[in-house]
Image (cartoon, rainbow, N blue to C red):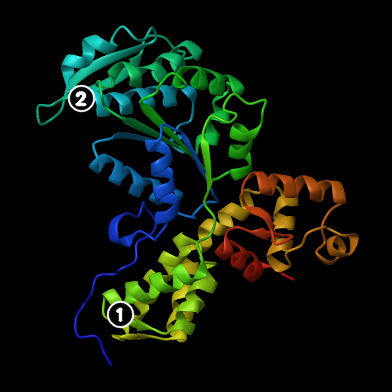
Amino acid sequence: MTMQHQTQNPFRYGAKVTGGAFYDRREIKNSMENAIDGGNNVVLYGPRRYGKSSLVAEMMTELQARGTVCVYLNIMNFASLADFVIAYTKAVYDQLAPAAAALKHISGFFRRIRPVVRMSEDGRPEMSFSFDSGKIGVAELREAFELPEKLRPRRSRLVIVLDEFQEVAEFGLGARFEQVMRSVIENHSEIGYVFLGSKTHMLKRMFAAPSRPFYRSAQTFSLALPPEDEGLKFLVDKFASVGMSIGAPVAKKIVELSGNVPYYLQALGSWTFRVASELRKNKISAADVDNAFEMMYDAERDLFESMFRALPESQRLVARALALEPAGVMTDEYRTRHFLPNASTVGTAIRRLVADSRIDMVDGLYRHLDPVFAHHLRRTSPM
């Protein structure tokens, strides 16, 4: 049977996915919303491409529909403390005080950042910020964190989302950043804070270690892989929505090749749809999935090669060995079989790969958290 007309691809990936394209994480999303509504801050951690940003984007959409003002910042976008302070200040201002009249309220908040109002091309006032000196430090950081409470309208609720929050460690202040932020936001009873991170072990330490400023300051959620049956249902429903059918064994093949990782499930579904559409087919076959996987992998190959080459040699060797043969204890026999360095060097490489959320212990074995990257390492291995 052939398709009679061109249909829009039902799968979305590569950006935040919301609405009907959202891969169902409603249970954890609802739990996070309940925690925020109860006056708690929230921590959400999980590996890259598991759908954290999409989940929070979906949650923000629902919160905003109920009248909650939301501010979102991705810490990965900032190269320095100054970048963060400027962006944080502007994002808060844009959401809470978009009128030029608010300038007089914030101009006295800062000593080294100067707020400036300019007119946009369509005649609207826009706020920007510039330096009065060449340095921004703890005092300016504190003033930035105080800004949401000063600008928040009375009887209003505000949620601030900080994605990849563990990256604040790169701003050069160490634990001082956490100390300053905690000392300010603990007095914000009507502002909820959501902290996201893909380096799960680092983020866990920030909020679970008794010596850290954020210890027990937020309700913690872990984003694991969704149940396999949810992935199967998602695929069947999405293909059915565009008049295509996919049998359970073929849908299971997509789940297995994608590792049920939400990003790859959507990506492989998308490539499979393209393959079937080009062949004008209504029924998805295993061969379609195989062809789609090769196309998806080819699209990612250069990125994977760059990721691999960016690792130190010891981590490259360990990463490749674990792609070929997941392992728990790295025995002498295992190290010899995979041409690995001495036990101490291997141990250091494992700790670094775990800290960067590239591998983790799963069912007693160290495994790659990115199944397609692991596929790349297996395919390019000379062994």
Q: Where does label 1 land, which residue?
A: 277
For this orientation, the residue located farthest to the bottom is 1
Mark 2 burial class by Cα count in 10 Å: few <14, some 14-19, many 20+: some
Q: Is residue 303 above or below residue 74?
A: below
Q: Residue at x 17, y 21 (%)?
A: 99
For this orientation, the residue located farthest to the right is 332
Residue 95 place in picture, x, y as percent: 26, 29
Instruction: State which quadrant residue 275 falls in.
Output: bottom left
Element under disc 1:
helix
Q: Where does label 2 land, which residue?
A: 98
Compared across the picture, whether 1 is left or right of 49 comes to left
Instruction: State which quadrant residue 185 falls in.
Output: top left
Residue 92 place in picture, x, y as percent: 32, 26
Query: Nearer the N terminus, badge 1 or badge 2?
Result: 2
Please name whichever residue, 139 or 56, is drawn nearer the observer in this view of the structure.
Answer: 56
Q: Are marks 1 and 2 in contact (CB under 8 Å)?
A: no
Residue 202 place in picture, x, y as percent: 62, 38
Mark 1 burial class by Cα count in 10 Å: few <14, some 14-19, many 20+: many
* Quadrant for the N terminus in the image: bottom left
- Identity, as a three-letter code, of the amino acid under mark 1: Ser
Q: Which mark is residue 6?
A: none
Element under disc 2:
loop
**What count of labels does the image hold?**
2
- Identity, as a three-letter code, of the amino acid under mark 2: Pro
Q: Is residue 276 above or below residue 367?
A: below
- In this rendering, which labeled residue sits more in front, label 1 or label 2? 2
Q: Residue at x 58, y 21 (%)?
A: 173
Residue 371 place in picture, x, y as percent: 58, 64
Q: Residue at x 39, y 23 (%)?
A: 189
Q: Residue at x 20, y 85 (%)?
A: 4
Instruction: State which quadrant residue 251 falls in.
Output: bottom left
* Quadrant for the C terminus in the image: bottom right
